[in-house]
Image (spheres, rainbow, N blue to C red):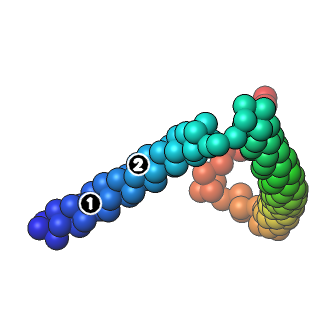
Amino acid sequence: MLETIKNDNCTHDLKASTVKLRDGLLYFGVGATIGATLALLFAPKSGSELRSDIADVSRQGYDVTVEKATEIKKQTVAAVNSIKNTAGSLYSIAETKIVDSEQAVVNAIEDLATEVKDVMKGGIEKAQDIPEPSGNGRSGRRPSSIM
């Protein structure tokens, strides 16, 4: 029980340190962006040069974003097509198995029906081969008297 608690604490500590690292990187990125923006604003450039630089950086960011979105779209389409193909294959396999199982059941029922008919036919033939009891009156059958 103590080992479980220790393991849970280690897992908790690992998650906490991962969250701290992620938050630290996020704050660093935000700070770097703010710093770069301030550096551009206080750089010894004219207003038109600064606006041009900002526009260039914005276009580059937009282009990178569009490229990444296109790449993600292609990967998503490929993944969806792969899933469709796999699902189609699985459906085809399942359909084949069901048809084979249905045919096996039909064959088993036909075989059983044939065996039952053969047994019944054999039983009727054996019953016909049984000799009639002698007429001594002790056979349990009464003679029929119609009149």
Q: Is residue 45 left or right of residue 125?
A: left
Q: Residue at x 16, y 62 (%)?
A: 5
Q: Given the image, on which type of amino acid does mark 1 rest?
A: Asp
Q: Position of residue 124 (x, y in %)?
A: 82, 60
What number is the disc on residue 13?
1
> In the picture shown, does residue 147 fall above or below 2?
above
Query: Is residue 90 visible in the rendered structure shown here?
Result: yes
Q: Position of residue 40 (x, y in %)?
A: 63, 42
Q: Residues within 10 Å of mark 1 (few under 14, many from 20)?
A: few
Foreground pick, 34 / 48: 48
Q: Residues within 10 Å of mark 2 (few under 14, many from 20)?
A: few
Callout 2 secondary element:
helix
What number is the disc on residue 140?
none
Residue under circle 2? 23
Q: Is residue 21 left or right of residue 5?
A: right
* Image quadrant assignment for residue 145: top right
Foreground pick, 94 / 3: 3
